[in-house]
Image (spheres, rainbow, N blue to C red):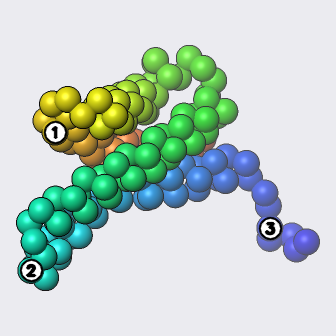
């Protein structure tokens, strides 16, 4: 190995953290902002577009829950269990995971699931945006010059 390569475990964790965010937060916003308008612009039947939105939405929630679990593991590995309740990142991740579980539970129950699912989707999107604004675990905050 060359002298310029150094393995920094905190950088790997921060990179995995950001990669997980790209997949689950980015996916949540791509569906309603890009995919659904493109399908409507193509002239597909409204019921078909709604069915695609429902099916893709459930898959995105499953991807989001996997990304959140990965981020929870990375946060606990970097800062310990106490960070889940005492840190903004931990609270946002737990709230996002709860929103995922409620969304999937409402999809299974299929009783008044539409409004509950929309609310959970919006809550999860808001948690994702607020989480993107937080620094990754292990990354030192940069002081302003």
Residue at the disc numbered 2: 43
Q: Is residue 87 left or right of residue 11?
A: left
The dot on residue 143 is: none
Q: Are marks 3 and 1 in contact (CB under 8 Å)?
A: no
Q: Residue at x 46, y 18 (%)?
A: 86
Circle 3 or circle 1, nearest the eye: 1
Given residues 105 and 30, the one toward you in this image is 105
Mark 2 to mark 3 CA distance (whole Å): 53 Å
Given residues 35 and 68, the one toward you in this image is 35
Q: Residue 104 appears at what percent x and percent y?
A: 35, 36
Q: Is residue 123 visible?
A: no
Q: Residues within 10 Å of mark 1 (few under 14, many from 20)?
A: some
Q: Residue 25 appears at what percent x and percent y?
A: 36, 52
Q: Residues within 10 Å of mark 3 (few under 14, many from 20)?
A: few
Q: Secondary structure at mark 1?
A: helix
Of the numbered discs 3 and 1, the one sitting upstream in the chain is 3
Residue at the disc numbered 3: 5
Q: Are marks 2 and 1 in contact (CB under 8 Å)?
A: no
Given residues 126 and 13, the one toward you in this image is 126
Circle 2 or circle 3, nearest the eye: 2
Q: Residue at x 78, y 57 (%)?
A: 7
> Is residue 12 depicted above or below 4 in this figure?
above
The dot on residue 114 is: 1
Q: Secondary structure at mark 2?
A: loop
Q: Is residue 58 left or right of residue 122?
A: right
Q: Residue at x 80, y 70 (%)?
A: 4
């Amino acid at each position: 190995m060359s002298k310029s390569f150094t393995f920094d475990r905190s950088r790997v964790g921060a990179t995995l953290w950001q990669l997980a965010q790209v997949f689950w937060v980015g996916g949540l916003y791509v569906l309603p902002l890009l995919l659904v308008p493109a399908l409507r612009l193509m002239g597909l039947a409204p019921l078909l577009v709604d069915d695609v939105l429902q099916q893709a939405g459930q898959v995105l929630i499953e991807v989001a829950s996997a990304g959140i679990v990965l981020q929870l593991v990375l946060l606990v590995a970097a800062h310990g269990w106490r960070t889940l309740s005492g840190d903004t990142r931990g609270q946002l991740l737990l709230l996002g995971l709860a929103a995922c579980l409620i969304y999937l539970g409402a999809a299974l129950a299929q009783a008044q699931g539409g409004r509950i699912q929309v609310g959970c989707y919006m809550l999860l999107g808001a948690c994702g945006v607020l989480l993107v604004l937080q620094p990754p675990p292990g990354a030192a905050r940069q002081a302003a010059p």
